[in-house]
Amino acid sequence: MASDSASLEKYLYELPEHRIAKHPLANRDDSKLLLYQSGNISHQTFKEVVDLVPENALLFLNNTKVIAARLFFHKSTGAQIEVFLTEPILPHTEFQKALKAKNKCTWKCMVGNLKKWKDENVLSLRLNDQLDIEARLVDREQNLVEFSWNGEQEFLSIVEAAGHVPLPPYLNREEEKEDKDRYQTVFSELEGAVAAPTAGLHFTDEILSQLRKKGVKQDRVTLHVSAGTFRPIKESDFKNHDMHNERIIVNKANIENLLTANGPIIPVGTTALRTLESLYWYGVKLSQDSASKFFVEKNDPYEDHYQGVSLEESMKAILKKMDELDVNELKGETEIFIYPGYAFKVAHGLFTNFHMPASTLVLLVAAFVGEDWQKIYEEALTNDYRFLSYGDTSLLLP
């Protein structure tokens, strides 16, 4: 039995299938925008967002870029097996370096019909008349797949040419031409995600420019969204959920901007929020042990011995560490789990779409706005909002 405070059942709601947006709108900024401000709700369009963001706000955007992670290989019999890239292993564990690999590389993958792939079978994928890519299962327990090919092509160019957009499973459709562009934000830069930071999909270059002219500062962090973001919670006590791990990249300017912010800090999307909050907890760990690794465990925010450190103290501990290492950039990992009872340390507002019932993301929203999450979702359902990745969005200013 779950304790009442951690009961997943409290975060269920009925989401009719027809409310799930199966395709993007014709224009990114045509989406609806639910504004939640100090307990009050109003309905806008995303085109009005420039008027709604405070002029002294600091927005944080997640500049991760979705890779075409779905590859379809064939056995010698002609049978097809899908190989879904999730995490680089060799020759590098960093996405940017791994995608530059030539001749061969090894990735952790999700494999469809894994039972039908015998260890001795070599799968093949013909990209063109000159290039064949082979796949070998080198570790069945770990789902490690080695890819090999002849020629000077980097693995990224192969993925871009042969791969398919990793659309969320709940869209329940194959990719279409529009997805290649629209399941990507206009500010995407660093390849490494297998799911889009979807709150950012509504922004256009024009809106970002108008926000800058208004005086809204913008900064960019990186969280490479993993397939774990779609993993359902199977525990009735959600605190027992096996939270997924994601890679983050931050730089010195990010930390300096957090220290000098003189208005609300508003992450665009739950991924940007998780990055900023994780950064805070890393600084807390450094303030207690300067040798701490940049890894935030799911329960770190709830440990008594990590409490009582200010945002300024945390950020200064990180700057000190960066100076010691003589680096401008930090790469880390986070499995932070934000659920009701979490005390937010960085974010004052949040752009976010509408999420699956009883998901880790609904728990995050409930942590941010309290019991009003139910009111927000009821309003969205009543007013015909479109839900999930290609759906409408909200700006939450508690």
Image (cartoon, rainbow, N blue to C red):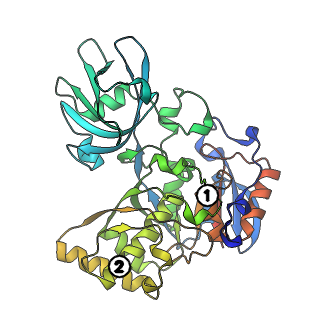
**For residue 235, which numbered disc appears in the image?**
1
The residue located at (54%, 47%) in the rendering is 230
Whether residue 104 is visible = yes
Q: Would residue 133 appear left or right of 349 to someone viewing this image?
A: left
What amino acid does circle 2 point to? Lys
- Name the quadrant of the N terminus: bottom right
Depth check, front residue: 313 or 79: 79
Label 2 secondary element = helix
Classify mark 1: residues with Cα within 10 Å, few (<14), some (14-19) or many (20+): some
Q: Is residue 10 left or right of residue 100?
A: right
| Image coords of residue 40 (percent x, y) | 76, 70
Q: Which x, y percent locates residue 370?
A: 69, 72
State the mark number for residue 286. none
Point out the tag, 2 or 1, that comes first from the N-terminus.
Answer: 1
| Residue toward you, 349 or 332 | 332
> Which mark, residue 285?
2
- Tell me the distance, in whole angstroms, between the alpha carbons under discs 2 and 1: 29 Å
Q: Dot 1: what SS? A: loop
Q: Disc 1 residue type?
A: Glu
Q: Nearer the viewer, residue 51 or 161?
A: 161
**Residue 234: x %, y % from top left:** 61, 53
> Which residue is at a point 59% across and 60% down the rendered structure image?
351
**Residue 385, how many percent across, how many down?**
74, 48
Measuring 49% from the left and 59% from the top, which residue is drawn there? Answer: 243
Quadrant of residue 281 within the rendered picture: bottom left
